[in-house]
Image (tube, grey):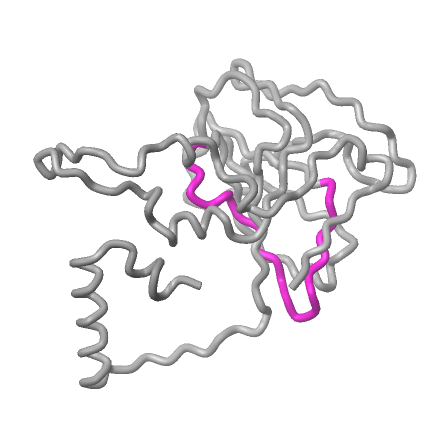
Amino acid sequence: MKITARCHPLLEPLLPKPVPAAHALPDWLRQMPSEVASDTLGGATIRTVKHCPPFIDALSLGLMIPLATDLSVQNGELSWDWNPPIIPDAPITRAPIGAHVPEQATGMPLQLNAQLIVKFTNFWTLEAPAGWSLLFTHPMNRPDLPFQTLSGVVDCDAFKNGYVHFPAVWNDAGFSGSLPAGTPVAQVIAVPRAQPELATAVMTEDEVAQSRQVQETLQHETGVYRKQFRH
């Protein structure tokens, strides 16, 4: 499985490159404690999500598309100091971010008062293997980012020469400062285009016993999923 990201030759010296999501883990994950005392449980020591493999694996899945350049945010206005070359043979904007008019979200349950719908420009084409599509979504488990990227699926085995840009709701009206180049603006996950079939069933007696054994083991031991089930 390989996803190929390509950019125009004139932009290559300027652009941060897409990276595996596992190489773009947030600083707060490294800095957060592994264990804390829980006031809710009378001071008992509990483990944090830093010990949760599904949480970490979601952060690490696929690849990240980075913000092309530093964005300055002051008083609700976005600006940048970036001057990429004019590319006569590629009709793509030179702006790292654009905007959607709010009417384009008419009918969506978005709270748009004092918020802005932006579009992060993606300067990379992405090619997926035959039969695979790409899911573009907000970087998972990243509530620290001042925006929420909207999700979309694109058949990038065929749409390999086009640019997929990323609409997002700027949901932190009080944010002020800089959003640095390289900030992940979209997580990209390859998904097979063939949809799986769904079957529902009642557990057999043996399956009930096996499920009970798993649940009891989880209650009495730590790291069971990581040690016995995680690939």
In the orientation shown, which residue stands out farthest toward the right?
88
Count all numbered tags in the image, as a single digit: 0
155 relative to 70, above or below = below
Which image quarter holds the C terminus? bottom left
Image location (x, y in percent) of residue 69? 68, 27
Magenta highlight range: 123-144
Q: Residue at x 55, y 14 (%)?
A: 74
Q: Quadrant of residue 117?
A: top right
Q: Residue placed at 32% from the left, 60% from the top? A: 225
Between residue 183 and residue 218, name the one nearer to us: 218
Q: Position of residue 87 (x, y in %)?
A: 88, 35
142 inside magenta stretch: yes
43 in magenta:
no
Relative to 7, 151 lies left or right? left
Classify 194 as above or below 156: below
Quarter of the figure with residue 118: top right
Determine the residue located farthest toward the top in the rendered image: 75
**Front-lying residue, 98 or 56:** 56
Where is 103 relative to 75, above or below? below
Q: Is residue 49 above or below residue 213?
A: above
Name the image quarter holding the N terminus: bottom right
Q: Nearer the viewer, residue 207 or 7?
A: 207
Tell me residue 93's x, y (percent). Answer: 77, 35
Q: Residue at x 60, y 47 (%)?
A: 20
On the image, the x and y values in percent for residue 10 come to: 86, 35
